[in-house]
Image: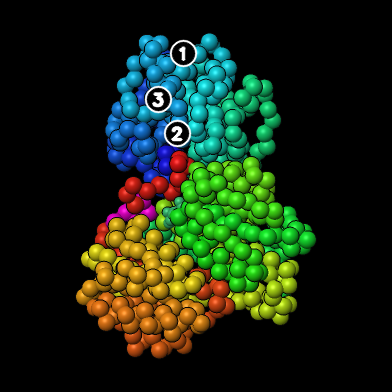
């Protein structure tokens, strides 16, 4: 999604803005722009395409001198990617400049109002209406003006604003779109995400909903929507720039694939005490856990796939009924919440608009909410009743890998904990499961050390057009993720099917040479899945099988077999997903694509 950076201080603003925007490139964008106050006017350069073009146009920022500025990378929602639609946007006199992340839902109505008042619109964006509204309400008091606009717009926004007659102050405001303020000796910053400012400072404030910030060279003041000054707590970011840089890897995705053993360890270890699982941040007593009657697992994309896997784990171990929902469906389907229901919202970014809305839907209905979130201080983390952080560190590649893996760990910890408290597993079983969990990081390392076989295989399939992923039970959940990983970064059409469904339609698509990836990690379903492998193979499919070490029987039916180490049957997704992630990665790499920034996709989907 779009990225925002703003700076006010002693340094030249433009190079800082360009540098900050480059740290947000991973979010996905199609145009970029910066505006800088040069002492007499606000000058702007913007352009469609990559940030490199903007850097060239501004000679690395040299053509836009000045110590206060705002910058933006745009991911088109309202209006095509074009120079005119790129941010910043201005009022007619060029005395107010604005950058915006989010969506103004009532902009059509507001635009008509403003047109009636004589305002002319140059772009197709929803953002431009904000520039004209600020102009209309401006009375020399920026905070009052901004609150007037905030009261009138519906939707989500993170805003950076400059007023020509306020040369010593940069303004920011937010609602439902992330925005932080960074503080340093050399000046102050705004950004839609921490990596944009990490090179300059680790001291940040999180702007909350309906709050406004006024940044000067050496001070920062915050206001609520009632224009009252408010105090905010400074947070120190613990992770460093290196964690968000590529560190010698060609792409962030590969780096993040390799960070999975550490990320899994970091998520697991603090919650394992001897043979017990202690999740202090869960905020539930044993009595609370026993009172749970139903769990809703809600998320989008890969996070949703972890929920599909977790349903098998929760129901299998803790015997609690689970409903799994795509957040975009959940928020509108009016679920029938019963006494004792609990909603777990899973999100790497903690800012996914649909997941946030689903969380609010559950909360508004009196349902206990738990967030499984990676980004500390993100909206879902703040709004959920309780939050379990996945300690994956910053994830930059659009295709999630370590985010997914650590979400699985959070689910396992919860399910095993719930099962033990509810007495559906014995102390001995729990000890065995804890031991199995502790082995996962090393087992992932082992799979990564043997990546060449997958790389070799992927290189043979660079030109393939369709791939099917099949599996039964939890293997179906793994197939969903394998399929998404492949399609999102390689642009190859791929689909995941519950293997038993093949005969109900899909098998007609199988022809000579069609690649089918079969996941077979569940002993009780192994023979049935082998039959499905045979069905597709006799129709000409080429079969790549992923199964447990020792399960050699599949070699008779599959063309290529990848073995994963033995683990508890509920934890196999953590291992089986590794070759599938590598497969997607090497196919994308081999096709010469931008692995980290696939077309049309954004890292964090902060709009509906
Ligand atoms: O930040 P979130 O976990 O809420 O994001 C959810 C999905 O947008 C995300 O998992 C997406 O599907 C990834 N691109 C998949 O790799």
Of badges 3 and 1, the one in the foreground is 3
Whichever of labels 2 and 3 marks the residue nearer the N terminus, that label is 2
Q: Where is residue 505 in the image (x, y as percent from the top left)?
A: 32, 68
Q: Decide whether residue 157 is among the magenta residues.
A: no
Q: Quadrant of the N terminus?
A: top left
Give the residue displayed 29% in from the left and 80% down from the top: 537
Of badges 2 and 3, the one in the foreground is 3
Q: Position of residue 92 (x, y in %)?
A: 37, 15
Q: Can residue 497 be seen in this view?
A: yes
Task: Tell me the SS state at disc 2.
Answer: loop
Q: Mark 3 points at which residue?
A: 108
Q: Mark 2 points at which residue?
A: 103
Task: Tell me the SS state at disc 3.
Answer: helix
Measure the C-alpha gap from mark 2 to mark 3.
12 Å
Q: Is residue 35 left or right of residue 407?
A: left
Rate crowding at label 3 as few (under 14), some (14 to 19) or many (20 or more) other CA atoms within 10 Å: few
Q: Mark 1 points at which residue?
A: 136
Rate crowding at label 1 as few (under 14), some (14 to 19) or many (20 or more) other CA atoms within 10 Å: some
The magenta stretch spans which residues? 593-597
Measure the C-alpha gap from mark 3 to mark 1.
17 Å
Task: Tell me the SS state at disc 1.
Answer: helix
């Amino acid at each position: 999604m779009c990225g925002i950076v703003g700076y006010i201080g002693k340094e030249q603003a433009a190079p800082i803005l360009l540098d900050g925007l480059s740290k947000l490139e991973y979010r996905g964008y199609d145009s970029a722009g910066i505006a800088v106050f040069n002492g007499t006017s606000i000058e702007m350069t913007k352009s469609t395409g990559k940030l490199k073009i903007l850097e060239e146009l501004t000679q690395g920022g040299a053509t836009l001198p000045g110590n206060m500025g705002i910058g933006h990378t745009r991911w088109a929602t309202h209006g095509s990617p074009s120079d005119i639609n790129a941010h910043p946007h201005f009022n007619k006199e060029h005395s107010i400049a604005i950058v915006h992340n989010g969506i103004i839902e009532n902009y059509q109505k507001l635009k008509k109002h403003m047109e009636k008042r004589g305002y002319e619109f140059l772009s197709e964006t929803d953002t431009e209406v904000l520039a004209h509204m600020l102009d209309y309400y401006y009375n020399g008091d920026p905070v009052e003006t901004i609150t007037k606009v905030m009261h009138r717009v519906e939707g989500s926004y993170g805003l950076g604003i400059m007023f020509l007659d306020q040369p010593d102050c940069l303004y920011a405001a937010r609602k439902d779109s992330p925005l932080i303020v960074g503080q340093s000796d050399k000046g102050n910053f705004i950004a839609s995400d921490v990596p944009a400012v990490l090179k300059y400072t680790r001291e940040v404030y999180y702007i909350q909903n309906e709050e406004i910030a006024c940044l000067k060279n050496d001070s920062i003041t915050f206001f609520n929507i009632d224009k009252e000054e408010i105090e905010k707590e400074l947070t120190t970011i613990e992770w460093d720039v290196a964690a968000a840089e590529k560190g010698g890897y060609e792409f962030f995705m590969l780096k993040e694939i390799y960070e999975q053993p550490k990320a899994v360890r970091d998520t697991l270890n603090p919650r394992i005490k001897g043979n017990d699982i202690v999740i202090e941040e869960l905020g539930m007593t044993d009595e609370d856990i026993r009172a749970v009657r139903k769990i809703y697992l809600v998320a989008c994309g890969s996070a949703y796939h972890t929920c599909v896997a977790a349903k098998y784990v929760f129901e299998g171990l803790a015997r609690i009924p689970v409903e799994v929902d795509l957040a975009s469906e959940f928020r509108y389907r009016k679920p029938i919440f019963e006494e004792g229901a609990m909603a777990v919202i899973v999100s790497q970014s903690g800012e996914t608009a649909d997941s946030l809305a689903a969380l609010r839907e559950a909360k508004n209905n009196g349902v206990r909410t738990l967030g499984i979130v990676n980004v500390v201080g993100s909206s879902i983390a703040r709004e959920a009743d309780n939050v379990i952080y996945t300690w994956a560190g910053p994830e930059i590649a659009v295709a999630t890998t370590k985010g997914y893996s650590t979400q699985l760990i959070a689910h396992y910890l919860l399910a095993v904990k719930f099962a033990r408290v509810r007495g559906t597993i014995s102390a001995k079983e729990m000890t065995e499961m804890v031991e199995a969990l502790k082995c996962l990081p090393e087992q992932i390392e082992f799979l990564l050390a043997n990546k060449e076989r997958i790389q070799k295989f992927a290189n043979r399939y660079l030109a393939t057009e369709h791939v099917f992923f099949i599996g039964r039970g939890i293997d179906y959940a793994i197939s969903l993720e394998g399929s998404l990983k492949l399609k999102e970064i390689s642009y190859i059409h791929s689909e995941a099917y519950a293997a038993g469904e093949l005969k109900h339609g899909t098998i007609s698509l199988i022809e000579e040479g069609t690649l089918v990836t079969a996941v077979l990690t569940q002993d009780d379903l192994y023979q049935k899945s082998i039959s499905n492998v045979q069905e597709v193979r006799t129709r000409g499919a080429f079969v790549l099988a992923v199964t447990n070490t020792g399960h050699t029987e599949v070699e008779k039916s599959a063309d290529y077999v990848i073995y994963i180490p033995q683990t508890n049957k509920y934890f196999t997704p953590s291992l089986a997903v590794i070759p599938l992630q590598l497969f997607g990665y090497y196919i994308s790499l081999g096709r010469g694509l931008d692995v980290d920034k696939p077309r049309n996709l954004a890292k964090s989907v902060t709009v509906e």
